[in-house]
Every structure is written in structure tokens, then in C-alpha cells.
Image: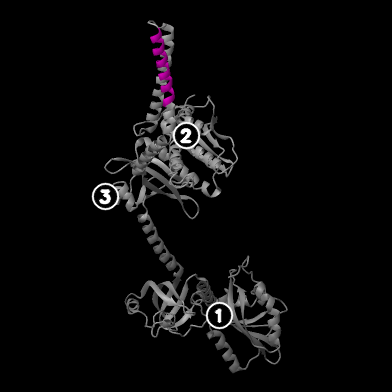
Amino acid sequence: MKHIRDKPHTLLPNRPGKELKKPELSKSDDNRYKSLFVNASEGIFFMTTKGNFIEVNESFAQTHGYTVAEMLNLNLKDLDTPETMKLASDRIRRILNGETLTFEVEHYHKDGHIFPLEVTANLFSDGKTSFIQAYNTDITERKLAQEEIQLRSEILDNMEEGVLLIRASDAVIVYMNPKAESIFGFDAGELLGKPITSIYSSTEELPEEIIKKLNINKAWQGETQMIKKNGTLCWGHVNVSTFVHPRFGPVWISIYTDITELKKAEKLMAVNEEKYRTTLNASPDGILLIDMKGIIHEVSEIGLQILGADTRDDLEGKDFSQLFLPEEQNTINEIIEKTITEGLAQNIELKTKKKNQSIFLSEVSSTLIQGPDGSPVSFMVTIRDISYRKKMESKQIHADRMANIGEMASGVAHEINQPLNIIAMVMDKLLFEADKTETVDIGFLKNKSDKIFENITRIRNIIDNISAFSRKDDDYISTVFDINSSITDGSSLLAEQFKQLGITLKLELDKTISRTIGNTYKFEQVIVNLLTNAKDAILEKRDGSNNLCEMIVTIKSYQENQFLIVEVTDNGIGISNDDIHNIMLPFYTTKEAGKGTGLGLSICYQIIKELNGTIDITSEPGVGTKIKLTLNLENKNGNGN
């Protein structure tokens, strides 16, 4: 009910001067009148046109919580709520005009609560006086039932699921809520009276197993394929139950949830899953999926082979870090941190253990996998066995060194011939002096002997340098070395050749720079390769031009914070924009056929990478090229000045 009166009604005293006579009735009418009052279940009352009650029956009084005597001291206004009172004067006017009205009102009960009544009222006259007589019925229960029905109707109309009511005897649709009509694309009421098979994807009757379960269990749930008005198919998850409807008899009530998009997503997911599995197992690298705690959850077939595992159980559920040597733990932590902050960590070399505890060198990359909200979910880690590649690189580096030595042969021969000629001249001078006299001045002999030993030492240094440069570096370990010394030793192998070709080689080396850790002979090879390329670029420019120009190659070293920088600059032919992006790739060369292997810069890149460095190339065609080597001293131990 809408509201309760603040206080129960207080009975009014008898209204003096307002007493009215009851209608005068014949004896037979009087008997009927009394019988009506006594036996009627409805409330009956007579009142004046001013609303004062003249006569009320027991039912009317009890409905309002009063006695008959109490009611006769009340006016209709004492019972009407404010909303009812607004319409009272108009209704009385119409009744006085002879209309019989049936309407709903709300009255106050004696205890203050409000309840609804249905009233039928008309004008009564005994020929002398006019009264209003009325019959009323308490419709509280009916109102509650209507409100319950309305609530259920609102729920059905606003459900996200489609609701269908199907008569069990003939499978005809007798009700559909708006959502069901929307799902299947029909207008309101368009499917009522139609068989359920009109929206069932099969032309057959409803599946026998569904009907059988409904008859036995009175319920069924599962997935069905239906057809829309436009002919397209849709999938739904259906819950069906059976009950007896007061109008339609046994019915099936079907709650239908459209899962068409879910089915499409599942199909797409299955396709993507298959693609994922195919990609995972087709990759030449081992792939591992690892959670944020570092636990391996999935491994590709190649991953099992690379890590020497027999089954996935050998790896799945294990800690990722157990695949590597203990000394690699800091590097693993750096990989994880970089992956989380940057989303990717690529090509990190790590010593890795197989199941049988044998060690191999691997190249590890990690990618961050994020959830829909962007939060990190897991890592995808690729492991590549680079043991064979490293052996091939080592062999190629050695072969490249030998090729460089072959190319430097004439210069080396000249370097050795010069001290040999000096030794020969000194010996000839000594013999000449010995022939002239029986004694030789000790000072003269010592001076000439020093010259001989000086040039012998020079020859030995040349041979040692070539021997060290040409030998394999497998047995060398990283040591602290001086970049400037490596530059000087490497350039000395080509100094004579440059001199013969008329190329000026300038060394601008900062003697205060820090030392670094690595293989000095590998770095010498980088210098030799870069000087060889610079020489070829200058000669190509000279041969293609009639204008003689000064030919210069400059090597400069300096330090900026934790970076050691070496720049090799030439004024040669330069590199085109099309070539400069590919120049580091193996076997890519800009030289004529037979004049280059395309491996020099690729080898330099690998060596500088091992030294924790980078190579940057800038070039202007026809003007020259600058190659910048940057070595990061950070995280290197044993650096000194």
C-alpha cells in the first residue's frame, strides 16, 4: 500500500442537527433490505450526498475495522485517502446525475493502513429524499495478485534470455518474450500459434531424445541449432522444464541463451589453437611458455630435442633457471627484467644444460605475453642451439684471417726484406773491414752487431704478429687488453701495402682511454678487415676518376663516459643508401664478382657484439665512409687505465 495514516482515526461524536431518516420502504422491500444487509459478503452502505453514512452493513464495517455504530458517526472523507478524495466530488456529481459508477478507491482502515476497494455506486431515492447507495469489495488480494503478475511480466520482458512457452500436446508456441522474438528476428506475436519446428533448424520433429527426457525427467538442457526469420542459423543453450498451465495444460518452458558468437569464438579459438600448435612445433628454435614465477608450462617438440628431454614431464612444471649454469643466473634475471620493462629481450648467449647435464651454447630470446588489461601474464622464450654456428664462425674468422694474410703477402715480404737487406749490408760492411785489417774496432763491431740484432728482432716481431693473427683463437680466453695496441698491431700489417699504394694512414689515438676485456687478436682482425675495405673503396674511387686526389684513411680512438669509441674513416667511393642497410649481412658484398666474399663486415659485427659493442656505418656516395665501433665498458670487470 502507498502509505499509512499517521494516527488511527478517532471516532467523532454524533453530529447534532445532521440526523436523517432512513428511506421509507414497503414491508416487502424492508425484508429484502434486511436480508441484503445480513447475508451480503460485500460491504453495503447508504450515505447522504454530503458523505455522511446513514446505514452500513456488518461487512462494510468489519472491512474498515469499525463497528456498525462507529461507522454511523463517520463521514466518507474520514475514510478516503488524499488521492481518492481528489476524485470524490466528481464521482458524486456524476452519480447525482443518474450514472451508476464502478471504480476503485483507497480507504483508511481503523488501524491506519490503506487498502483498496472496488465500489459500485448509484443514486437511491424514496421519492422524498435522495441517497447514495454503494456496494464495495476488498480487492487487496486481487491487487497483490495483479502486482505479482505485473512483476513477473516485467521480469520476462526484461530478461537477457529468450523465453518460449510451448504446448506439449502439439509443440505449438503459445508465448515468447521480447528477447526471444528479437533473437530470432520476428515481430511481436508473429510466432504465436506456430509449431516450434518453424524455428528449429531441422525439418524433423523435435529430437526424440529431448522429448523422452522431458517426459521422464520433466526437464532437459543442452545446445540446439535454431533458424532465424532471415534463414541464418544460430546456436543456443536451452534449459527446458515442464509444468501444467491453467490455460494451455502441460507446457514446456524453454529458457534460450544465444551462444552463436560464443560458438564462432570457440571455432576461431580452435583454429588459432591449431595454428599455434603448428607454429610452435614447426619453429626451428625451441619454444617454452613460462609463467611469471619462472615455471615452465609448455614446451615445443624442438624444445624437447634441443634440451635432450624424453617427454614434456621432464621440463613442464620445472624452474626455467635450472636449464642454465649457476653463473648465468644474473644474466637470466636481466633477461626477465628487460622483458617485463621493454616487452622483449633478444639473442642473449647463455651456457645451457641438457637433461644429461651436457653443456651447449644457446641464444635465448624472451617475449612478454600480456592479458586483455595489459598486465603481464607469461613469457614466451625461444632457445636456439648455436654451438655449430659458433664453430662455423670460428672457422670462417680463421679463414678470413688467412685470406687477409694472403692479400698482405707482398707487403709482409717487403717488411721482412727490408731488415734482411740491412742485416746483409751490415754483415758485408763487417767482412769488408775485417779484410782490411787483422783487428776490428770493438766499438765498431758492437755498433754493427746492435744493428743486426735490431733488425732480427724486427723480423721476429713481424713473424710473431702474423703467427698470432693467423692462428685459431679457440684456446684464447678473454683478457684485459689495450685498444690502441691492437689498432697499432693490426694496422702495421697493412702499413707497407698502404704506403706502396700511396694511401696515407693516420692514427689519432687517445692514450688516456681505458682498457677493456676481450680477445685482442679478434679486435685486430676487425681493424684489418675495416682497413682492407677502406683501401678497396679508395682504389675503386681512384680507378673510376681521372682526377688524382689525396687518399686518406684515419683511425681515431677516444672515450665518452663508459664507452670506448673507435672510428675508421676513408674518403673512398662510399656506400649507396640501398646497400647500407644490408652491408652487415653474411655474403652481401658491393664489390665486383671474385673480389669479395661478403663476410668481412659480418665477422666484424659478431666480434664487436662479443665485446659488448655496436657498429654504426654512415656513408655518402662519392665522398667517403665512417665506421664507428662503440664498446660498452659497463658490467665488464677488470677495466683499467
Up/down of 205 relative to 451, above or below: below
In the rendered image, residue 468 lying in the magenta stretch gets the answer no
Residue 27: x and y, percent? 60, 93
Instruction: Report the amino acid beneath label 3.
Output: Asp
Q: Residues within 10 Å of mark 2 (few under 14, many from 20)?
A: many
Up/down of 527 relative to 32, above or below: above
Q: Report the number of numbered marks.
A: 3
Residue 567 left/right relative to 286: right
Q: In whole angstroms, how far apart are the C-alphas of marks 3 and 2?
A: 47 Å
In the rendered image, residue 422 lying in the magenta stretch gets the answer yes
Overall secondary structure of the magenta stretch?
Answer: helix
Which quadrant would residue 636 be assigned to in this image? top left
Q: Which quadrant is home to the N terminus?
A: bottom right
Residue at the disc numbered 2? 527
Instruction: Report the amino acid beneath label 2.
Output: Ile
Q: Secondary structure at mark 1?
A: helix
Q: Secondary structure at mark 3?
A: loop
Up/down of 511 relative to 498, above or below: above
Residue at the disc numbered 3? 310
Observer-nearest residue: 286 or 580? 580
What colour-coding does the image apply?
Answer: one colour
Q: Secondary structure at mark 2?
A: helix
Q: In whole angstroms, how far apart are the C-alphas of marks 1 and 3?
A: 92 Å
Residue 59, label in figure: 1
Residue 472: x and y, percent? 35, 34
